Amino acid sequence: MQVRNFARQLLAALSRATPAFDPGPTAAPSQQRFTASGTSISRAPTWERVAIGIAAIALLLALIVPALVIDAGRIADDADRATAQNQLRLALVQAIGVFVVILGAWFSVRTLRLSREGHLTDRFKSAVDLLSGSGISSAGGVLALERIAQDSRRDHPVIIELLALFVRAPSTSLDDRRTGLEVIARRHRPFDGKRVLVADVSGTDFGAAKFDGLDLSNLDLSSSKLLSARFRAATAIRTRFGKCALSQADFTDAILLGADFAEADLNKAVLERAKLNGAHMRGAKLTLAVLNGAVLDKADLTRAEMLNTFLNGTSLKEAILTGAEMQLVSAAWSDLSSARLDGCQLQAAVLAGAVLRQAVLEDADLTGAVLRGADLSDARLDRAQLRGADLTGASLGGATLTDADLTGATLTGAVLTNADLTRASLTGADLTGATLTGATLEDTDLTRAVGVDPAA
């Protein structure tokens, strides 16, 4: 009687731990679960049959082991021996019951996961089918994939790559391309994992799209067309814009740290107050672009075209502008401390009040430039062209101007303390009120210079 009770308890525990599951008509045979009601089992998968086998073996052990462990040699009295055996059986059954409950819970979680994965697969197939449609249908597919990417960390990278492929496809409409890019930008970035997920949407025409406030970081938009596009307050850290058509684009207040704009067309673009620290802008076209108040510290603008560009109040500390075309640029009160401007074309540039401390301007052409009140302390201006430049009130203390051409320049009230003017040409220059204490004037040409005694 007690043995039958133990068997009933074990089967009842097994039944509670692994509830019946109806997979429905579409479920695969491998997903069908057994029904543990009484002793009826229907098409149980292999792993479930194994579990039942383990439980049956455990039941047999619970029945046999006590009799072997507690024999007549140890406990002579039959009643005491039976009591001890039953107590051991009860403990074993309880232990087996706990094991079965844990095993059943694991089976339930596994079934739930398989069911969820099957549901995600169905959703994925439906979304992909919608992408092949047009209009509302394809847009619905894009949004459906976004939802799946948010729900599944494992499928997230694949879906982003699929959306990027969809965006690049020539048959995709302009509206769908924009929607796809917005979805990629809105993705749950923690699901990207440790590796940097770069979505490739290069060579795509997005037209005058509006991406205000979106996070476009780590996207590859190189060679894309984004004429008059809006990126106000957008984030595009390390985004690739190389060779992009971005004429008249609006990047006001955008965060573009380390972004790649190499050879991009940014003519007439607006980048006011944009953060471009460490940006790669070699050969970029920035004619008539507006960068007032922007930050381009350590940016690389080698050979950039910046004719008539507005850089008022812009920070360009340690920026590289070697060989840049900057004629007629307006950079009043800008900070170019330690910047590289060697060989730069700055004819008629406005740099009034600019900070150029320790800047390198060797071989630069500053003909007719306005540098009133500029700080050029310790700057290197060897062989620079400063013909007709306005340096009124400028600070040139410790600057080197070896072989520089300052013919006709205005240096009224300028500070040239300890400046090196060896072999410099100051023909016809106005040095009225200039401070030349400690300046080196060896072989300096002071012919027709005003405000200084050539014979002194």
Image: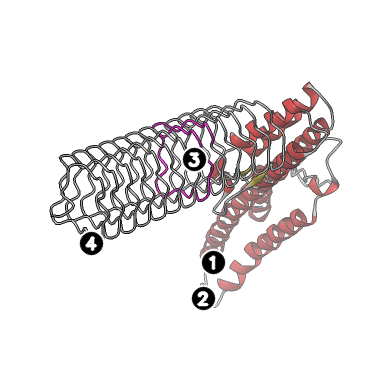
Residue at 34%, 33% in the rendered image: 332
Q: Which of marks 4 and 3 is in front?
A: 4
Q: Do the residues labelled 2 and 4 touch (CB within 8 Å)?
A: no
Q: Do the residues labelled 4 and 3 touch (CB within 8 Å)?
A: no
**Residue 79 versus residue 255 in the image, above or below:** below
Residue for badge 2: 74
Whichever of callouts 2 and 4 sits on the residue coming sooner in the sequence is 2
State the CA–CA distance, disc 4 to disc 3: 47 Å
Whichever of callouts 4 and 3 sits on the residue coming sooner in the sequence is 3
Observer-nearest of 410 and 348: 410
Q: From the viewer's perspective, is 363 left or right of 52?
A: left
Residue for badge 3: 256
Residue for badge 4: 442
**Residue 112 versus residue 49 in the image, above or below:** above
- Rendering coords of residue 318 (x, y %): 37, 51
Question: Please, what is the three-letter code of the amino acid marked with disc 4?
Answer: Glu
